[in-house]
Image: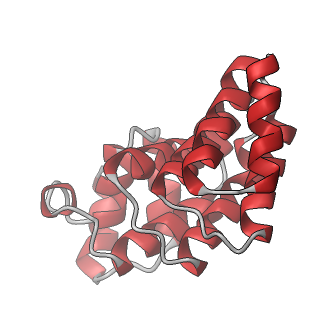
């Protein structure tokens, strides 16, 4: 714990992405101190150092570990869009899982929008079914009920898509 406290003091003087992701991860897992993890993130932002994919992955992981996804997931997604963060596969999986666990459709919609903007929805996923949103949400291991709710809450692409929802 002494090493972690020293690392936090050093980080306060020279905020950077590498230390932020490491500290956020350690605070979330070792200390189960999500509030301190958020303070590290806030310090990074206040120092005008934009987060990167590793910081995003660490923050989502810390929120999931402390079961506080719903408290931060929307902010993280907003920051991903604001800072044009290039998400790696791990960050995308962590964000998707955090969205599901938050049990809120709004973050899911934001994540889908971000992935569409950066062309990160894979062809294989969207071709599984006629409804790309349904297949995406099922691919991310959402429940069928949640997936259908998501697909019905967003605009459908054709009338035939809607008729197929009823047949599932």
Give 155 or 116, whichever is nearer the viewer: 116
- Above or below — where is 5 with respect to 45? above
Taking 103 as reference, is 12 left or right? right
Q: How many marks?
A: 0
Residue at image coords 74%, 22%: 3
In this figure, which colouring scheme has been used for the structure?
Answer: secondary structure
**Which residue is depicted at the point 46% across and 38% down?**
143
What residue appears at the point 13 percent right and 56 percent down from the top-left corner?
124
Percent coordinates x, y for residue 41 in the rendering: 73, 54
Q: Quadrant of the N terminus?
A: top right
42 or 91, which is in the foreground? 42
Residue 61 vs residue 97, the one in the foreground: 61
User: Which quarter of the picture shows residue 118?
Assistant: bottom left
Side of 26 relative to 95 (left or right): right
Residue 100 x %, y %: 56, 44
Up the image or down, 130 lies above or below 16; here it is: below
Residue 4 spot, x, y in % from top left: 75, 26
Q: Tell me which residue sits at (44%, 80%) in the image.
A: 155
């Amino acid at each position: 714990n002494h090493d972690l406290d020293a690392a936090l003091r050093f980080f306060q003087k020279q905020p950077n992405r590498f230390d932020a992701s490491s500290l956020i991860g350690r605070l979330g897992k070792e200390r189960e101190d999500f509030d301190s993890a958020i303070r590290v993130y806030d310090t990074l932002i206040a120092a005008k150092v934009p987060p990167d994919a590793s910081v995003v992955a660490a923050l989502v992981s810390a929120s999931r570990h402390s079961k506080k996804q719903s408290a931060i997931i929307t902010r993280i997604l907003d920051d991903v869009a604001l800072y044009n963060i290039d998400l790696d596969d791990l960050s995308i999986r962590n964000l998707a899982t955090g969205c599901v666990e938050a049990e809120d459709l709004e973050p899911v919609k934001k994540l889908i929008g971000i992935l569409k903007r950066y062309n990160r929805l894979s062809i294989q996923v969207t071709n599984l079914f006629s409804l790309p949103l349904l297949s995406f949400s099922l691919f991310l291991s959402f429940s069928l009920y949640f997936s259908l709710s998501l697909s019905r809450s967003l605009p459908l692409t054709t009338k035939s898509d809607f008729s197929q929802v009823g047949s599932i």
